[in-house]
């Protein structure tokens, strides 16, 4: 193959494996009874061209798998750690050493941000983390500098959008919440001084969930909602309006240029009448289309970094905020696809590979069982205490089941969650196992992944990922040449259209 052929092959390779939506990241939460192994998740991210990830804590399996993956990491610190990190410089140094330095140097994890706390000023916390957040942030920043990571790793604090408000409901009327106004200014000043971004979580779904009169189209990006007019700006979606409310609050207080990352945004697929596949697809596709167009908001035309919440469903998340909490994933818990998405130029979502499942065996209500059996209600209650039954609620994917299937659903979730262990499909003799999949319409009777098989199988990461991690010098140089003259992107676009 001549040099032309070689370059062509390289270009094709870069287009197929390296097509990335600029600025797009995913929240990878791990509150689940059956976590997908880290190496499979990292492969899922790479296969889809997702190059940024946000973790809520330094989960060792996830961190190790992210090593030398080419994926940039925002690493979170849970709120419970804020007080100890605030009160001791030493604790912050230990945290950075154990949770950042070690992974950076030993595994080659590309940590870009440390997210100190998670929505610590949420109004419902009633000030619990108000004293500790800023000192913890300062201590972590100092510890990063001491560890020699001050340039590479930036600090930030992911905040809920309730830290700002607008008395007249227009973005231009915005300011920070009075109870944390001066604290916010101190934190922002500190972030600016350290070249660090502010991070904000925006949830159009929750606007709709909490206010039945919320105009539903305004939650999406279709542009068909009755607009909100703010001076010379016309808003047709709540995401823009909300983001710009923050930008106004920043401007008003003299911080018009601090970068603002969207730390969480997304739409759940189950557990509420507005949480369904059609709406989630509409929202996330709309969001991705904006990013593909490089579109920001009216006040900030350059698009922000955006982390979609979330990557995978999490069946042990608290449902205090609502039953939808366990269904935010772009993918189901096992990395299978919920709905198709166009990632640009016709590129489609790719599911997780190499997932091992338990036997194709479900637990259902015995045909001989009587619905009036005195043990039945207690058994269902018990099953749903230990397993996730949120799909059974009103407006959810399994709400149309008849009474018998409803019970079966609960029994099966319990049986799967307990790894199909012998004796766990019994419920006083009311339950039996079956090899016929009871799923119907929108209701999925899950089979969990086989954790024992995943544990014993050798990690394929080290071998399979290497070829991509360590391209030959020739490849690196050729790609550098091509991208530096700025043609790679355009040519990729051309190639994609040609192959469609
Ligand atoms: C590292 O982070 C994890 C999870 O956030 C935490 O449990 C652990 O205590 C941290 N290490 C140190 C030394 O603080
Ligand atoms: C199905 O189960 C859920 C949860 O156990 C319950 O709230 C609901 O009323 C049940 N529906 C039917 C039709 O039995
Ligand atoms: C199922 O439960 C019943 C009643 O609690 C018990 O008598 C029976 O032995 C159990 N069957 C199995 C297979 O565990």
Image: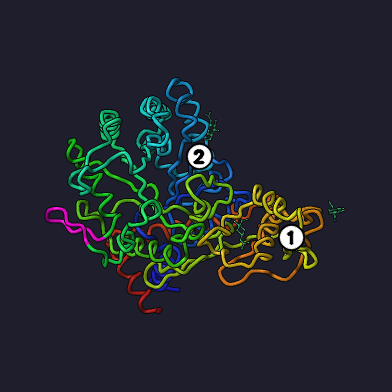
Instruction: Tell me the residue at 55%/51% (across/down).
Output: 314
> Looking at the image, can residue 359 be seen?
no
Instruction: Tell me the residue at 26%/64% (across/down).
Output: 225
Q: Magenta residues: mostly which secondary structure?
A: strand
* Residue 279 horizontal/vertical position (percent): 41, 64
Note whether 374 is above or below 368 in the view shown: above
Camera-nearest residue between 226 and 488: 226
- The quarter of the picture where residue 416 lies is bottom right
Instruction: Tell me the residue at 28%/64% (across/down).
Output: 293
Q: How many marks?
A: 2
Query: Residue 427: which numbered mark, if any?
Result: none
The residue that disc 1 covers is: 372
Ligand 2 picture quarter: bottom right
Note whether 419 is above or below 146 in the view shown: below
The residue that disc 2 covers is: 57
Q: Residues within 10 Å of mark 1 (few under 14, many from 20)?
A: few
**C-alpha span from label 1 to label 2:** 46 Å
Magenta span of residues? 227-236
- The quarter of the picture where residue 436 lies is bottom right
* Residue 240 horizontal/vertical position (percent): 26, 54
């Amino acid at each position: 193959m001549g040099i032309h052929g070689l370059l062509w092959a390289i270009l094709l390779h870069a287009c197929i494996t390296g097509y990335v939506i600029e600025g797009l990241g995913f929240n990878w939460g791990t509150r689940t009874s059956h976590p997908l192994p880290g190496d499979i998740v990292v492969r899922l991210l790479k296969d889809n061209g997702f190059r940024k990830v946000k973790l809520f804590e330094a989960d060792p399996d996830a961190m190790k798998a992210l090593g030398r993956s080419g994926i940039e990491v925002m690493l979170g610190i849970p709120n419970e750690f804020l007080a100890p990190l605030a009160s001791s410089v030493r604790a912050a140094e230990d945290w950075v050493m154990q949770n950042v330095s070690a992974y950076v140097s030993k595994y080659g994890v590309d940590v870009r941000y440390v997210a100190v706390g998670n929505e610590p000023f949420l109004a419902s916390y009633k000030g619990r983390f108000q004293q500790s957040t800023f000192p913890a942030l300062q201590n972590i920043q100092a510890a990063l500098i001491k560890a020699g990571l001050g340039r590479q790793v930036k600090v930030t604090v992911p905040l809920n959008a309730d830290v700002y408000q607008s008395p007249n409901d227009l973005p231009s009327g915005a300011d920070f919440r009075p109870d944390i106004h001066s604290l916010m200014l101190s934190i922002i000043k500190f972030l600016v001084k350290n070249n660090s971004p502010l991070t904000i979580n925006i949830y159009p779904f929750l606007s709709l969930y909490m206010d039945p009169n919320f105009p539903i189209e305004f939650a999406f990006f279709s542009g068909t909602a009755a607009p909100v007019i703010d001076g010379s700006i016309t808003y047709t979606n709540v995401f823009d309006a909300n983001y710009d409310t923050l930008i106004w609050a920043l401007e008003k207080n003299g911080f018009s240029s601090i970068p603002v990352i969207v730390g969480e945004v997304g739409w759940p697929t189950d557990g509420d009448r507005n949480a369904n596949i059609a709406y989630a697809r509409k929202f996330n596709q709309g969001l991705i289309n904006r990013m593909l167009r490089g579109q920001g908001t009216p006040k900030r035309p350059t698009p922000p970094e955006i982390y979609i919440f979330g990557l995978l469903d999490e069946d042990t998340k608290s449902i205090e905020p609502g039953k939808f909490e366990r269904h935010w994933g772009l993918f189901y818990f096992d990395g299978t696809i919920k709905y198709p998405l166009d990632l640009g130029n016709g590129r489609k979502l790719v599911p997780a590979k190499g997932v091992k499942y338990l036997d194709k065996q479900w637990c259902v209500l015995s045909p001989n069982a009587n619905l009036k059996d005195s043990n039945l209600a207690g058994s269902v209650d018990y099953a749903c205490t230990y397993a996730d039954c949120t799909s059974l609620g009103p407006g959810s994917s399994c709400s149309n089941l008849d009474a018998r299937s409803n019970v079966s659903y609960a029994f099966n979730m319990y049986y799967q969650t307990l790894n199909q262990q012998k004796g766990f499909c019994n419920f006083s003799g009311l339950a039996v196992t079956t090899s016929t999949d009871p799923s119907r319409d929108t209701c999925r009777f899950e089979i969990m992944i086989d954790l024992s098989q995943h544990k014993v199988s050798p990690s394929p990461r080290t071998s399979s990922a290497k070829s991509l991690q360590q391209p030959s010098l020739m490849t690196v140089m050729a790609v550098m040449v091509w991208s530096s003259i700025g043609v790679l992107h355009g040519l990729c676009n051309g190639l994609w259209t040609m192959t469609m």
